[in-house]
Amino acid sequence: MSVALHTSAPLDHLAAVRGMAGLLEAGGAHGDRAGCLDPAVVAALHQADLFRMLVPRRLGGAQVPPARYVQVIEELARHDGSAAWCVNQASGVGMGCSHLPHAAALQVWGTPQGVAAWGPPASRNISMRAVPGGYRVDYDGNFASGSPHATWLGGFIQVKEADGSPRLMADGKGELRAFVVPKAAATMTVDWDVLGLRGTGSNSYTLRDVFVPAEHTWVRDGDSPDPDPYYRLRAGQVWAGGFASISLGLASGMLDAFIDLATSKTPRDEANPLRENQVVQHEVALSHARLASARLYYRAALDDFVAELQTRQSPTLDMRIAYRLAATHAIHTAREVGEMIYDAAGATAIFNNGAFARRYRDLRTVTQQLNGRKAHYANVGRHLLGLQPAMVGL
């Protein structure tokens, strides 16, 4: 099936997000209740072409530089963590477009509404067997963020040859292949009932004996054939940086809301507004400094990482370690600031219709995800101490 190339006019994505701040704030409350993004928010995200920020220009995307991309994700999260999460997840999956033949990539990501979602295997009842022209896939997936508004779903599986033997790569490891299929091929299960990031609609799905053309698959974390160094970034690196930026945005939104609160709230049994309290003054300044420091550290690490990729086909272990440490530090610094602000806001913070509770729950949910684990610190520490790190998550 041929698809006409849709090319959007150049957009200032950051200005677009700031212009929809009120819609995002209201949409965050909707997502908390409904378990999916507000349709009005989805429409606005499409209108601003935010789902295709990392899609290459040859496919009609914006190909936004990584440094600009993380600014946009942070600004989104300042107003609605779920919207930022969905855009970032879709962007990571969308890096697969650089691996596909042009016509296949255009079919998936070449239209304004093209959004792909996926999640890790949720059971052992999965298989990807080679057949003429492609693969037959059985897959149970979960955590498919953005699945309610996605048009394509995918996953990643160890490939078996037609005779059932595992397909091996040059290094002797099994080939892990990613794929995408039209969402209509999947059976969805609405089971996203969680503490935070409730609006992401990260539901489960099932594929049974679905044929996937070879051109809609690629080696997961393989080197992209695209000559542009931009696409030497991998999905995991997009997600790690995106989660760092989402965390910083959520904590910054909490800090902004607290500063507003402190000018008007006088705690019970006290004579002066919160802003006159020296403890509050100290914590506001400390929170601001911590977020600014973590942001600068992460963005400097991102700049270094991208600069190195201009001359290397793949990132070195030292590059991945440095990038991972900066991203993990940003996530957990933001969590610490969020907890400080939540405490300082007192009983005002506990109401779900207020400015604090949803952001706090979203922030704590980020840290429970793979890219937010404290275990990354130990992994980096092993490397710094001359030991072999675990490779998962780097």
Image (tube, helix red, strand yellow):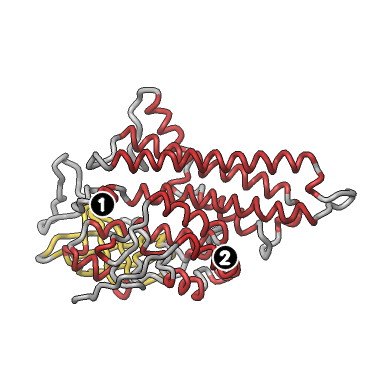
> Relative to residue 165, is residue 8 depicted above or below?
below
**Lateral position of residue 18 relative to residue 275, left or right:** left
What residue lies at 26% left-to-right and 48% top-to-bottom?
229
Q: Which mark is residue 21?
A: 2
What residue lies at 40% left-to-right and 23% top-to-bottom?
385
Q: Position of residue 276 (x, y in %)?
A: 81, 45
What is the CA distance from the residue labelled 1 to the residue labelled 2? 35 Å
Q: Is residue 29 visible?
A: no
Q: Which residue is mark 1?
A: 220
Q: Position of residue 342 (x, y in %)?
A: 68, 50
In front here: 348 or 171?
A: 348
Assess disc 2: are there few (<14), some (14-19) or many (≥20) residues with their C-alpha within 10 Å of its C-alpha: some
Q: Locate the C terminus by quadrant.
A: top left
Q: Position of residue 101 (x, y in %)?
A: 17, 62
Q: Locate the N terminus by quadrant.
A: bottom left
**Lateral position of residue 365 relative to residue 172, left or right:** right
Type of amino acid at the residue the image marks with label 2 = Ala
